[in-house]
Image: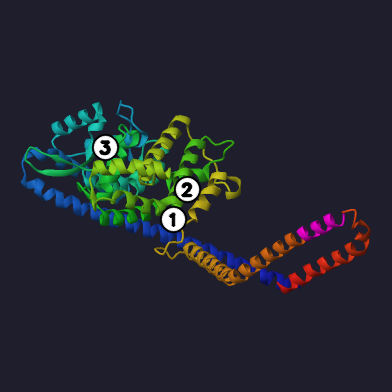
Amino acid sequence: MNHIQQVFIQSIMKQQQQEKQQQVKQEENGQKQNIQYLQKQQLLTIIQKCQQQQQPIQQASKCLTLIEVQNQITSYFQQMILQKQIININNVLDQQLPYFLRVMGNLIINGLENCQGDKEIVQEIISQYKSNPLKITMSCSLFQTIGLLFRSQLVYYDQCTKYLVNFLLFRDDFCDIFFNTLYIYQITHGQTFSQQIGFTQIHQMIKKTQDDVWTAFIFKMMSQQQQKMTKDIFLLQFNQYTVSMNNFFTKSNLIMDLVAQSVKQTSKLHNDEIFQEYLLIMGSFKATTQDFLKKATQVFFEESNDLDLLQFSNNIIKIHKQMNCQILFILPMLLQLESQYLDHLIQNGIQEQQPVKNSSNYYLKMIEKLKNKCVYNGEEECNCKKCLCIRRNRNSAKESQKKKREALEKIGPLQDEYDKIQKKVQSLEKENQVITTLLLDVFKHPSLEQLASQFIEPLTKIISDQEFYNIDEC
């Protein structure tokens, strides 16, 4: 290859590299634009809900001040999102709370301080929240807007605030699930109802202050806040629950991202117990979900087509013990685990490392393996490559077993005949042994002892020949 050809090839390679780089940049820009578009759409939806809530408030009495203040906070946060302004907050709460609740509480107080409503009422609410943050409640619009603020990375409290982008409670795919399950009706003096999610309910989920907190949460989620859960609703909701959790484990999430940044020997981000717990939860979900559904459906609805919270609570304990897994509690378990990890980061400080290769990180390798495992495990409901491959292998194994059975069915009669022949041979051998023994005893008599040499050998030959002929006849 001459010099001109080398220069020509090098120029082509450079051009290809430049084209690739441009393509990557275009894809990144496209993704950013898509994210921005989705955030705008989410914000528009929240604004519409907020406007719908404000209409009855304007016609009602002054007793609805709290809801009106919540809507003003929501409007303020929405303006920050539209203007892409970062909200800097400081800690004004004395009570010890999980990290994410502390940040969220300070954010709400910041929103209150920027309200344009009655200052006396606002200050009274602020003082109540500062003295007892567990009294904080949020409307649906306010809660969704706060989630969007964190996902947009427009809140700064400290170095760990950025990890709230992927925190389970604020994720776009789980934000509505938590609100629709945890909300309670708040009644005002004007006899007006409003759906509110409070810090108390969220805190109980994290701390698991009572044994039945998670059970009640799952029952409300599966029954869609109804007093009784029917079989059809359970099957429908469990399927949606499975899809949501499968997407959670497959896509980027808080713990998985931190696993990718951790190095066991040096990083303070690393925490074996939390990573191991995450792997156990993920492995249990991937391995036993379909078996659990069959068992749960059988136990829950064995006697009737619906069940209440008490029946559900008794049965879920029984199922979890029998199957040695807690599939239905995976969502609250993950919320608790992520909260614990954020608290671990605050206590131990942050020392970030470069992302490590899969081969050098045990947890990341295991997570990648489990990500590729489908929860349906070859069931007909799923047509992914893994399930199709499992079904092909199962069908192949069934076909092989079928051929073996057919072969055994054909061999069966031949085996019976062979067994009969073996029995005849054994019977003839016994008879010949008896005859031989008798002849030997006879020729031991003194009067016949001299004739033994003339008869023993010929008789022995006759008996052996007879055995041979009998076997041939068989």
Q: Going 21% across and 52% down the picture, which residue do you hit?
A: 47
In the image, taking residue 162 as reference, residue 222 lies left or right, namely left
Q: Going 13% across and 48% down the picture, which residue do you hit?
A: 54
**Quick one: label 3 or label 1, which is nearer the N terminus?**
3
Residue tagged by mark 1?
375
Q: Secondary structure at mark 2?
A: helix
Q: Quadrant of residue 63?
A: top left
Q: Secondary structure at mark 1?
A: loop
Extent of the magenta region:
433-444
Q: CA distance from mark 3 to mark 1?
A: 30 Å
Tell me residue 444's x, y (percent): 87, 54
* Structural crowding at the residue carrying mark 3, measured as other residues with C-alpha within 10 Å and reported as few (<14), some (14–19) or many (≥20): some
Tell me residue 160's x, y (percent): 42, 38
Instruction: Report the amino acid beneath label 2.
Output: Gly
* Structural crowding at the residue carrying mark 1, measured as other residues with C-alpha within 10 Å and reported as few (<14), some (14–19) or many (≥20): many
Label number found at residue 201: 3
**Quick one: label 3 or label 2, which is nearer the N terminus?**
3
Q: Could one spot residue 225 in this view of the protein?
A: yes
Residue 393 position (above or below residue 278): below
Q: CA distance from mark 2 to mark 1?
A: 10 Å
Residue pushed farthest front? 447
Residue tagged by mark 2?
283
Assign the magenta stretch its main secondary structure: helix
Q: CA distance from mark 3 to mark 2?
A: 28 Å
Q: Going 48% across and 31% down the picture, which residue do you hit?
A: 348
Instruction: Report the amino acid beneath label 3.
Output: Gln
Are dots 3 and 1 in contact, CB under 8 Å?
no
